[in-house]
Amino acid sequence: MKVEQTGKLRHGKWNLYRPCLFGSERASSIRTAPSELRQGRKAAAVGGRSVAMWVACPFFMGSEMTAARASSGACNRPVSRILEVEKIDYSFYSTMFDAIVVGAGPGGATTSTLMARRGLRVLMVDKASFPRDKICGDAVSGKSVDALKELGLIDHFQRNECLGSWGVTFSGPSGDHVDIPFTKALDRPIAPGFVCAREVFDDILVKLAVSEGVQLRENTTVKGLLRNEAGAVNGVTVKTPDGCTEDLYAPLVIGADGAYSVVVRELGLDQLDEKHYVAGIRAYYKGVSGFHERNHIELHFVDEAIPGYFWIFPMADGMANVGVGMLSQVIKKKDIKLKSLLGLLVNHPRFRDRFDGAEQIGPMKGWGLPLGSKPRPMAGDGWMLIGDAASLIDPFTGEGIGNAMVSGMHAADWARKAHDADRFDEAFLSEYGSEVLTLLKDELRLSHAMQRLVNWKWLLNTVIRKAGRSEDIADAISCMFDDLEEREKLISPSFYMKVLFA
Ligand SMILES: Cc1cc2nc3c(=O)[nH]c(=O)nc-3n(C[C@H](O)[C@H](O)[C@H](O)COP(=O)(O)OP(=O)(O)OC[C@H]3O[C@@H](n4cnc5c(N)ncnc54)[C@H](O)[C@@H]3O)c2cc1C
């Protein structure tokens, strides 16, 4: 097959190549091609199908094109005019996709997998290379477990690197504690929750996406959004691993690039509201003792950390994820240094014994948590946001993996619908945002209310003390993990009256 260069490689830009190749390129990709491509395209009928495609240089990794580029010595030099390429899986080399997903965290990998399963041609771009760490508590809740089941991945989490967890232990400022199982069915084959280092968790999700046909480009950083003449987003500009700039096109760009999203910044949505943003810090420890026999995750409300909490989550191989998170507004107002606070909590009289002989593995690291008490607009012309980029973290627990995966699942549905209807406009895609908010709004509202209730220390102490002594109250709280209607009681005065007089 012959590949013809259509011009010189410009500094920082990849040039386009026109291969004399015809195949079953999807009509949607051609339809959505940028105008400069559409103008040059000569459709050809092969076997009754009218198709053509374009490729860009950096996709020729391992091919003669790479050799040509390497021999040119730099990305701003011309390469030879005609290149002979023996065999190309052309779908891999296109710069045009049905959807581009920015970020391969749990949100991005979930939506990419499901879009690929629904027949869309998906490019997933991440600035990191996998496996990679993500600063997190590493606790995978019931909602994420349901999403993993839907993806068909749950068996992977019974592996040695992940530790099944059957409940949560809360302790209050006075030191009382209560153990709440996630479920009454303790004989279930799979634990209702897991603690799994994100280095492992995210890698499993990314591998699944690739196995479903998603094209993954690692070490590739999205720098900006591309827009068509009407202003709709229709692609991204990336910095490639070798430092060149490249434009990639799709009628739909999904921002799954987390708390510091470039997509959000480029859309001009990135105002940080300290009342709806938590800063968290985490460290790994080996040898922490005193965990519940069923590997409960632990949330401790300690005077020094309120309105946030100190967490100690047991992990496989005697490891523990230990951290503290607090509303940015409070951190700023009280000038709190989170690293010092975490050091203080680890040496706190209530926890000191458990850390005796334990060793900190690696540094303390901090990251932001954009809360779902103020979600961002989730869709517009040519774009959707999911997960942290959409600000969907639970305001009380700080969990965001579940909502990233759930929003990703809905985004995948809407991506398919958008392609079927050939509608990538805001009016159409905003239905996705409405759907997710309808699903999550009650839960997020409740969690926001709970977050504020934590400021009432006497109430927190009373609930935890009484729940620790009354099976009925502990049971009632346990039911709240699965049942939103039950959870609603947590913000009802009658629940607290019952607790006070129990
Ligand atoms: C301290 C802390 C503790 C937490 N504990 C928990 C917990 O125990 N359980 C829980 O459920 N949640 C927890 N969370 C929240 C959870 O980590 C996030 O909600 C979750 O990671 C969101 O997933 P995501 O896919 O939206 O984004 P991310 O997981 O952040 O993934 C975003 C991806 O985008 C990539 N990216 C970013 N910018 C670019 C770019 N410009 N170009 C290309 N790629 C880019 C990144 O490399 C990354 O791979 C915690 C968060 C913090 C900070």
Image (spheres, rainbow, N blue to C red):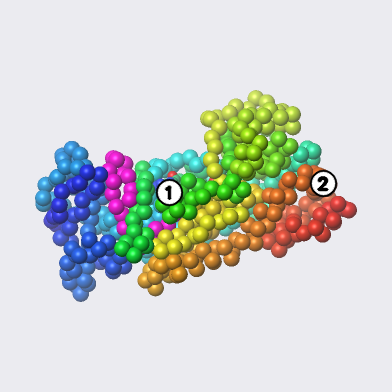
> Is residue 151 inside the magenta stretch?
no
Residue drawn where x is 60% and y is 61% of the image:
440
Residue drawn where x is 27% and y is 66% of the image:
30
- Disc 2 to disc 1, C-alpha distance: 44 Å
Q: What's the magenta region?
A: 237-257
**217 with respect to 41 (left or right):** right
Q: Which residue does the numbered mark 1 point to in the structure image?
A: 262
Asked whether residue 48 appears in the rendered view, the answer is yes
Most extreme residue toward the right is 501
Q: Which residue does the numbered mark 2 point to in the structure image?
A: 462
Q: Percent from the top left, x then y, of residue 419?
A: 38, 69
Q: What amino acid type is highlighted by mark number 2?
A: Thr
The earlier-in-sequence mark between 2 and 1 is 1
Q: Percent from the top left, x then y, of residue 496?
A: 81, 54
> Between tags 2 and 1, which lies in front?
1
Q: Quick one: 99 or 372, which is closer to the camera?
A: 372
Q: Percent from the top left, x then y, of residue 312?
A: 65, 38
Q: What amino acid type is highlighted by mark number 1?
A: Val
